[in-house]
Amino acid sequence: MTLPHLFHQISRRKNLFSMLVWMIGTAIFAGPSSDSRDPEIEIFPPRIRLAGPNHRHGLLVLGKGMGKSTTSLFSQASVSVEPPTLGSISSQGEFLALSPGKGQIRIRVAGKDNVIPTEVGNTAWGSKVSFANDILPIFTKTGCNSGACHGALAGKGSLKLSLRGYDPQADHHALTGQLAGRRIDKELPANSLAIRKPLGEIPHTGGKKWKKNSPEELLVRNWISQNAPPASDLEPGITSLYLFPGSITRSASDPAPMAVLVQAVYSDGTTADVTSRAKFSSISEDVAGIDNEGLVRVVGSGESAISAWYNNLVATSRVVSPRGSNATKYAPGKTNNWIDLQIQSKLDALAIPASGDCSDGEFLRRSTLDLCGILPTQAELEEFEKLDPASRRSLWIEKLLGRSEYADYWAHRYSDQFLVSTKKLTQSAVWAFARHLRREVADNRPWDKTCRDILTSTGSNLDQGGVNFFLMHRDPAELNEAIAVTFMGTSIACAKCHNHPMEKWTQDQYWAMANLFGRVTLKTGDRADEVILVDAPTGDVNHLRRGFPMTPRPLDGPVAKGNRREDFAKWLTSRENAWFAKAQVNRLWKSMMGRGLVENDDDIRATNPASHPGLLDRLAGDFVNSGYDNKAMLRLIANSAAYQRSSTPLGGNETDERYYSHHLLKRLPAEVLLDAYSQVTESPTKFDAITPGGGNGSQPYGGYPLGTRAIQLPDSAVVSTFLDSFGRPERNQACSCERGTETTIGQALHVANGTTLNGKLKEKENLISRLVQGGSNPDQVLEKLWQSALSRKPTIQEISRSKPILEAAWKGSPEGKREALEDLFWAVLTSREFLFNH
Amino acid sequence: MLRIDANRPATFCDGMKRRDFLHVGSVSALGLTLSPLLSPAAAPADGDHNCIFLFLVGGPSHIDTFDPKPNAPEEIRGPFKPTRTRVPGMQITEIFPKTAMLAEHFSIVRSVYHTAAAVHDTGHQMMQTGKLFASGVEHPHVGSMVSYLKGSRNELPPHVLMPRPIGRTGGNLPHGQTAGFLGKSHDPFVLNADPSAKDFEIPDLLPPGYLPPVRTERRRKLREVVEEQFTQLDKTAQAKQLDEQFQNAYRLVSSPKTREAFDLDKEPPAVRERYGRTRFGQSCLLARRLVERGVRFVTVNMFETVFDEITWDIHGSRPFTDISEMSRLVVPSFDQAYSALLEDLAQRGLLTSTLVTALGEFGRTPKINPAGGRDHHPGVWSALFAGSRIKGGRIVGQSDELGYAPLNRPVSPGEVASTILESLGVSPHQEVPGPQNRPVPLVDYNSPAVRELF
């Protein structure tokens, strides 16, 4: 399947039949004609099957012409209908069905013939207006059932509709049954409240939504005059939605709007052009906007995804806008491995230059922080310089991956992900879970096995660390949502109460998945703080609205037949599961590169496509093929030239934050920064109290010996103003958004004036006291400090401006010497160069 | 380059010119320029009002304060008689004589209620964010919403919380005093110091006391040396954004206005006395100073916990207070400070642009318990609104004859939040990016502002 197809086709599970019809149709169509087509010409839709005469369907004839820009070639094409009795083509390029039959639309452009297989059924036009297929989409398009209006949980005024029309039965009752049926008037449809309110003929808090005699009004009037029938299981349901074309390349210098086409496919195989009835949105409005009529206007450079929403389905298409058409050609960036080819092709498409290679010092600091959460020492810097320049970066990465600090750092990250904390767990449970996770990381256990073990764990929470995952989410619905975020990087929470507005997930699917976890039973064990997890033989979770349980099955996976959690874990970690591998490689990528290929990293969904979909697919594929080897994935990323790029932007890439043209800056995470202060000043942090239970009180805790690093703390409830201020995750909810990466006033004040850094500088026994006592001269001090804090030597300017201060102090008392050193350390350790990983 | 020199005159809010001697932190390397100081007590543009949010932690008894029930049985009406106020028909209890004299300035909503668990923490969440937290998602404090939408007016932060955040109140839940999902950069600036203390000083705002100016200056110079080497930070949009808060912090630290704004010694002794030399009184005075100097929102916690202090939490049994202790030890400091604040703001022409709310997290049980106290009662209680667009002297909603539940016009925490936002010119239901960028309305759609107050 081609990429555009992957991204713009969303289909629901009940559409097996129509998928079949579709595939057969595509197969016939794709036969001989696709070979004869000019690859630069694209014709949409691939087929048309209208319900009956008088229905219309738009056509797109697109060429990727000069500079690969997508333009309409309709005016240059000669279009004919065969046989001519089937229908005609309007000057706007619409096919209008005239009589039932089968045939094709022939489009001759650039000397080549293209055909669209076309069929017209025999349903009379307007003979039966469908509540689900025709009326509800109007309410969605004009915003009537949005969350801000009647779609709100409590409705608006006295009318409550389901959010974006997910519950046709309830909506039909609201419109026809409530308020003694006053909302519709079957005798005089134009007199209905459901028409007069949106027309603004009588006071309506939401204002005037439809124009008089607009298609919206006419259709609703027509529906009412047909006795306002409800949605019926017998009428064809929508099964797929397509947004054509799947990708648009166009630069902002082309101001002409470009039309898209939205095609709905129904369970009886018919298609409908729903462009005028779909609701549109764009992910990056600063790149491309789309209006209500489906006209795309490119306004800036970069990429965006546009979405069309119709009748609870959503389809997506990509817009690529290269930086100015007259942008100069740039020399490509360095290439270390296949990642770089993918990154480069995107940079080329967008005409963004790549910054050069980072220095060895920058590489050492960056890679050591990213892989082990510590700073390289002065000795390591010197050791590195002696190695063979051709291979030393790879060697260094290898060395980092083998260090115990690697396990500390990544175990901490997984503890974030799994919410390990005494807020909800006892101290002994926290240790059991954290030790379990650290062992898994240290052994580089395959990620699928780590996850499967946690999800299927049974027994005592003190022996099986993974059991504690279930202690933190005791409500099956909450557990369901946490599992989707933690293991699949996607949120299904919306579907708890209504069909997911940005995804294909329905409320039924949500509760079907929740029912997989309904048998988890927790019992008090014999030992102190012990909880035993067992799977009860019976028990179900009821659907929130329907009040009865759904057949247990994971989202679009198979029905669970055996042990429900085991079946779920099997589905989750199977090769076919699109989320599992992607979620993990995307997280690893983000923690190295500063931005996920999908951003946010726990917001993977069709309407939020990756910046580099091909790269993400291949990384995920590699990850699966390596046996879910986290270290191998980190090794691959760290060795790429994209990772090793300088963070200094070039003219032309300063504003890029998505395409990895220069390395993105990251503020050091709270724990890493605190440890870095301890490391550079040689003054460890004391951790001696915890705040259990999520409140504000604190109690002493003696379990952390002096020298324990912040990253080694298993518990997010350890008292530390510094860590709180710098955004340590609370570990309350499964969301990567918990880790604060912002910089705040409080942080700046705390670093500069607070007791944490100043306390370490003043500590009686620390590196400063040793430098005062030892025989180092100012030059050596500067070199030592710069190398251990900034991983580089001081520049000539830095030496010439700071050495005189030290030299003056060196002539004075030991106290004066110490004070000068404290001030020098303060200056380096509060500088932005120190606070950021760059 | 920002360098606040000894020779640079600065205009202060009292209109005097003073020489400033502040050299703090390193700022010139950040390429900052000092924003022009606001003119003194500038009337904010229409729609750009301020708020002083007095949070009466512990939960005042409505019957013993602003909703007296003189006709109820003795075990309900309590020991205090109602007293007339300057507004005909509005009665409050006799223990608020100073407040009663200012009734034309404030209105009472007597039908506030919530339906969550009757613990302090849930009420803290709801009264300050409009919402009960669910699934670990923390909704932002109303002041942080304002901070997020409007930003700061000058070098002072947009939202200041004092004296300290609410601590332990028994429920072990978050108290709704952060920016929640809006992110830490919109958290309130927390004072963490007692303005009534003799040696009142805000931690971290200034360099440690043991550093003489010569060393602060040396630190600044040395930091400049390092900063100037690292120029790539100034080039990218991302770096600029990352740096914004550090810039804000250095603006805060380096601005002469900061020290002056937080310096209560600049107030005449008579004014300090008028507010009362209590933690709450001096906090209210500081709140007025900050609003006058451009802070948009000030949250004052009257108490920080309900365990180690005498508060509104009058269970009667130890360690809690009973009704009579409340009237002797808690009420006078409120009466003193609240009346001083309204009077002072009105005299300075600030009341028309500054909303003052005073409310607790719930009311107290109508029936006095055997220990001579009253317990938690979220069924109904009273809230005070004054200033800004609020019309004074009104009573909105009534509780029933026993003070048990709203008799009419029930007002939910969400409606209180909407009222505050609307008064400040913020549309209460506008959507902001929530967790995972889901659009979340500031206040739920079904909780409109209490129109009767405007």
Image (tube, rainbow, N blue to C red):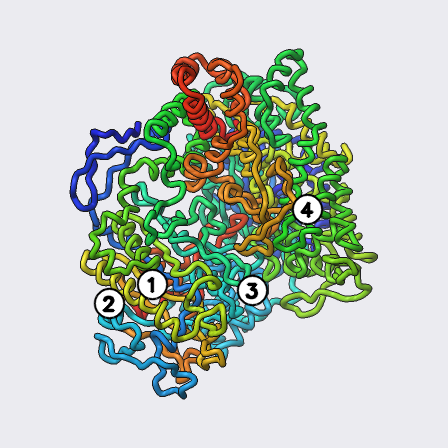
**Does the rendering let one see residue A606?**
no
What is the number of the mark on residue A490? none
How far apart are the alpha carbons under marks 1 and 4?
A: 45 Å
Name the one closer to the observer, A761 or B175.
A761
Residue type of the residue flagged with mark 1: Thr
**Does the rendering let one see residue B403?**
yes
Secondary structure under tag 2 reads loop
Which residue, given by chain and number where applicable, does mark 2 sit on? B105
Which of discs 3 and 4 lies nearer the camera? The answer is 4
Residue type of the residue flagged with mark 3: Val
Q: Are marks 3 and 4 on the same chain?
A: yes
Which of discs 4 and 2 lies nearer the camera? The answer is 2
How far apart are the alpha carbons under marks 3 and 4?
A: 43 Å
- Callout 4 crowding tier (Cα within 10 Å): few <14, some 14–19, many ≥20: many
Q: Position of residue A491 (x, y in %)?
A: 61, 50
Which residue, given by chain and number where applicable, does mark 3 sit on? A129
Compared to B390, does A594 lie above or below?
above
- Callout 1 crowding tier (Cα within 10 Å): few <14, some 14–19, many ≥20: many
Which residue, given by chain and number where applicable, does mark 1 sit on? B357
Which residue, given by chain and number where applicable, does mark 4 sit on? A487
Q: Are marks 3 and 1 on the same chain?
A: no
- Callout 2 crowding tier (Cα within 10 Å): few <14, some 14–19, many ≥20: many
Residue type of the residue flagged with mark 2: His
How far apart are the alpha carbons under marks 1 and 2?
A: 12 Å
The chain under label 2 reads B
Where, quadrant-wise, is the N terminus of chain A in this rendering? top right
Q: Residue at x 26, y 69 (%)?
A: B99
Name the quadrant containing residue A560: bottom right
User: Decide: marks 3, 2 in contact (CB < 8 A)?
Assistant: no
